[in-house]
Image (cartoon, rainbow, N blue to C red):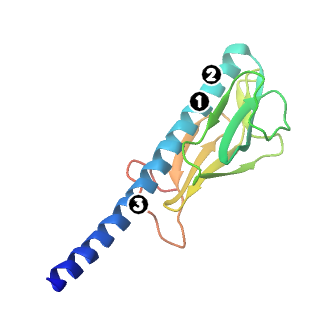
Amino acid sequence: MMLVVAIMAILTTGGMTSWQSYQQRIFLEQASSGALAFMSQVQFAADWRNRSYRIRIGRRENVACISAGQLADSSDCHSELGLAFTLPDPGLSLDMSQSDIGLGFYGLRNSAGTGHLTVVNRAGRVRLIVSAKGRLRRCSEKVDGRQPYLPGIAPC
C-alpha cells in the first residue's frame, strides 16, 4: 500500500508541474496576442484620426499595462483616448525598446516609430516588433540558449 501511495505522489507531482508550465505558456500566448491586437487598434486609430500616438508601458496596481496617447511621458496606464490594455496575469511583465523618435504610430506620415515590446513570464519571452512601415510581428525569443515551446509563435 505504501508503494502505491508513493507512486501516486510522484505521478501527481509530475502532473502538477506539467499543468503549471502549460498554464504559463497559455498566459504568455494570450497576453502577447492581446497586446498585438491592442497595438493594431492603436495603429488603426492613428491612421483614422490622422494623429500621432505613442506607446507607453506602466503598471496599474500590481499588473503591467500598455497605453497609447499623444503625451509621451506617462507610466500610470492612463490614456486620454481610452486606449489601454492590461495584461491578464500579475506574473507577466513588459519590457520596451524603442528608436529615438519613440515607439508609436504616426498617422500624419502613415508610418511608425520602430521598436519592440517584450512580454515575459516563467514560460519564456515573446517579442512584439513594430517596423518603420507599421508592420506588426510576434516571435518568441531564446531563453538561456534554447527555444521554449510556444505553439503558434515563430522563433525570432
Q: Are marks 1 and 2 in contact (CB under 8 Å)?
A: yes
Q: Position of residue 99 (x, y in %)?
A: 78, 46
Disc 2 residue type (three-letter) = Phe
Q: Which residue is mark 1?
A: 40
Mark 3: secondary structure: helix
Q: Identify the residue position indicated by label 2 in the image.
A: 44
**Mark 2 and mark 3: span between their CA atoms?**
36 Å
The mark nearer the N terminus, 2 or 3, is: 3
Residue 72 versus residue 118 in the image, above or below: above
- The numbered dot on residue 135 is none
What amino acid type should be assigned to the residue bearing mark 1? Ser
- Mark 3 highlights which residue? 20
Q: Position of residue 152 (x, y in %)?
A: 39, 47
Q: Residues within 10 Å of mark 1 (few under 14, many from 20)?
A: some
Of residues 74 and 150, which is closer to you in this image?
A: 74
Q: Position of residue 117 (x, y in %)?
A: 65, 47
Q: Earlier in the sequence, mark 3 or mark 1?
A: 3
Residue 79 sits in quarter: top right
From the viewer's perspective, is residue 126 above or below residue 105? Answer: below
Q: Residue at x 78, y 23 (%)?
A: 80
> Which residue is situated farthest in the bottom direction here?
3
Query: Dot 2: within a 10 Å radius of its alpha carbon, few (fewer than 14), some, or many (20 or more) residues?
Result: some
Q: Secondary structure at mark 2?
A: helix
**What residue appears at the point 41 percent right and 54 percent down from the top-left corner?**
23
* Amino acid on which disc 3 is placed: Gln
Q: CA distance from mark 1 to mark 2?
A: 6 Å
